[in-house]
Amino acid sequence: MKPPYDITPDILNLIASVSEKLGEVNAVHLDKPSPQLRRENRIKTVQSSLAIEGNALTIDQVTAIYDDKKVAGPKKDILEVKNAIELYNRIGEFDPFSSASFLKAHNVLMKGLINDPGNFRSGSVGVIKGSEVMHVAPPGDRVRYLVNDLFKYLKSDRDAVLIKSCVFHYETEFIHPFMDGNGRMGRFWQTVILRSKYPVFEYLPVESIIKEKQQKYYEILSACDKTGKSTMFIEFMLKIIDSELNRILWNELKVMNSGERLDIAKEKFGMKEFSRKDYLRLFKDISTATASRDLKSGTESGLLLKKGDKNMTVYLFA
């Protein structure tokens, strides 16, 4: 069965806005950010997603662990960070439409933290905040059936991937297929789904905005439980995605430097020769003088090899 939700005017408007921004991101080559920005965003993603679940390690501590440095802190928190870093670094290995791949990801995320990582729960589980029971998940003997049904929907339904990724995230929270790690898996798998169509999502720290709006995040999940539909959660997540794409377009683009442009050019041109004109076609928003400075800097640093002279000049990445 298709999970219950409505396609509202707000959802349609948000889909249009997100799609437009994704087009802009691709046009200015931010679909795959510079290595430094990828690193920063991945660290932010890991720290934010774990902090939502109560991990106490700071962004500086997570950065140190990412750089394979020793950190003082609770062993459980440190292991959670190491597992999450490994999980996100291996994101390309996971098939968004495979429940077996979903279990494999959970095993990476929760190894050493629970007794049975990578397996669906068989017992009962609920979500408790303080003294209040926020959510009672379906019985353990229904989990496999519900998850398989969810993957069938994900694979065959014709609704937009942006919508289906939000639905999957919510339904993972509702089903609670594991004894622990459900929130982290819901957020991670939404990224896996979105990345399959839009590469920029691999490095988009959506979790950092969820962390900022953590109370609202839980309130929306609870409200959806009461209505029996994920409509409000879809709207909530699309607003977050739209906001994060807007941040990238208005902040990251403004500070892109010659080194970052050269990194992008290296990925685009590979081992092929290219001219300044080719470089300008790649970066339509820069001047001829800026392109010349970039190429001169790349040549002087040894990143580029230069052949020919004047109008016949071509470049090749070393």
Image (cartoon, rainbow, N blue to C red):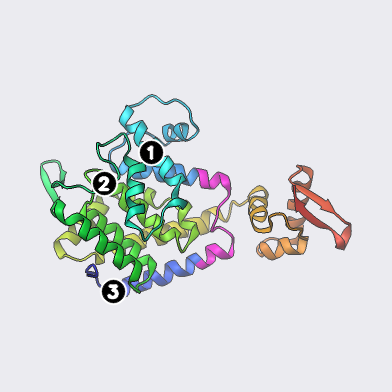
State whether residue 100 is above or below residue 59: below
Side (left or right) of 2 relative to 22:
left
State whether residue 60 is above or below residue 207: above
Outermost residue to the right: 309
Residue at numbered disc 2 = 119
* Extent of the magenta region: 23-39
Specify the amino acid type for callout 2.
Asn
Specify the amino acid type for callout 3.
Thr
For numbered disc 3, what is the local secondary structure? loop
Separation (CA) of disc 1 from disc 2: 16 Å
| Badge nearest the viewer, 3 or 2 | 2
State whether residue 89 is above or below residue 241: above
Q: Is residue 212 visible?
A: no
Side (left or right) of 67 relative to 206:
right
> How many C-alpha atoms fall within 10 Å of the one at disc 2: few (<14), some, or many (≥20)?
some
Separation (CA) of disc 3 from disc 2: 36 Å
| Badge nearest the viewer, 1 or 3 | 1
Q: Position of residue 212 (x, y in %)?
A: 34, 48
For numbered disc 1, what is the local secondary structure? helix
Q: Position of residue 210 (x, y in %)?
A: 33, 51
> How many C-alpha atoms fall within 10 Å of the one at disc 1: few (<14), some, or many (≥20)?
many
Which tag, 1 or 3, sits closer to the chain's start? 3
Q: Is residue 150 visible?
A: yes
Q: Residue at x 23, y 67 (%)?
A: 3
Q: Position of residue 114 (x, y in %)?
A: 26, 37
Residue at numbered disc 1 = 83
Q: Is residue 28 magenta?
A: yes
Which tag, 1 or 2, sits closer to the chain's start? 1
Specify the amino acid type for callout 1.
Asn
Residue at numbered disc 3 = 8
Q: Is residue 196 magenta?
A: no
Outermost residue to the front: 100
